[in-house]
Image (cartoon, rainbow, N blue to C red):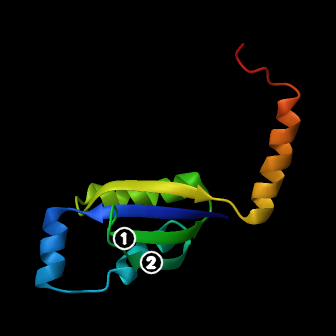
Amino acid sequence: MSVYMYQASYSGDAIKALVNNPQDRTGAARAAIEANGGTMVGAWMAFGEDDLLVIADMPDDESMAGVALAIASTGAIVGGKTTNLLTLDQAVASMKKANAVLSAYQPPS
């Protein structure tokens, strides 16, 4: 399983619908994530560049992409972006791999 951060903004129509009918959309997000074999870690509304942020534990990239594509296809979301998150153990392993690559990589000269 991999952990993903999904950030997006609501479309104008979705914001209008939420203002006219205030509701917690966590259940809808959880259902979409679980439909592709994942678990929602949490969901938050935000202000600034994005309107919402969701953290999900998913089986693989394709499963997360399926969730993001399905939600975007409804038109309720604009500008969605997905980030694959690493645990700190994974980050340290990546640093070790990067160190090994440095002996083989030649930068432009």
Q: Please identify the residue farthest to the top as the structure is shown.
A: 109
Image quarter of the N terminus: bottom right
- Identified by mark 2, the residue type is Ala
Q: Please identify the residue farthest to the front as the structure is shown.
A: 109
Residue topped by disc 2: 43
- Residue at image point 80% right, 40% down: 98
Q: Position of residue 50 (x, y in %)?
A: 34, 64
Report the label total. 2
For the residues labelled 2 and 1, say whether their Cβ atoms are less than 8 Å apart: yes
Residue topped by disc 1: 52
Mark 1 element type = strand
- Which numbered tag is attached to residue 26? none
Is 36 left, or right, of 25 in this rendering?
Answer: right
User: Rounded to the nearest whole Å, what is the CA distance between mark 2 and mark 1?
Assistant: 7 Å
Instruction: Classify 10 Å Cα crowding around label 2: few (below 14), some (14-19), many (20 and above).
Output: some
- 104 relative to 85, above or below: above
- Residue at image point 14% right, 81% down: 19
Residue 63 versus residue 82: which sits nearer the camera? 82
Q: Position of residue 24 (x, y in %)?
A: 31, 86
Residue 26 versus residue 91: which sits nearer the camera? 91
Image quarter of the C terminus: top right
First reached walking from the N terminus: tag 2 or tag 1: 2
Q: Position of residue 14 (x, y in %)?
A: 18, 69
* Quarter of the view holding residue 41: bottom right
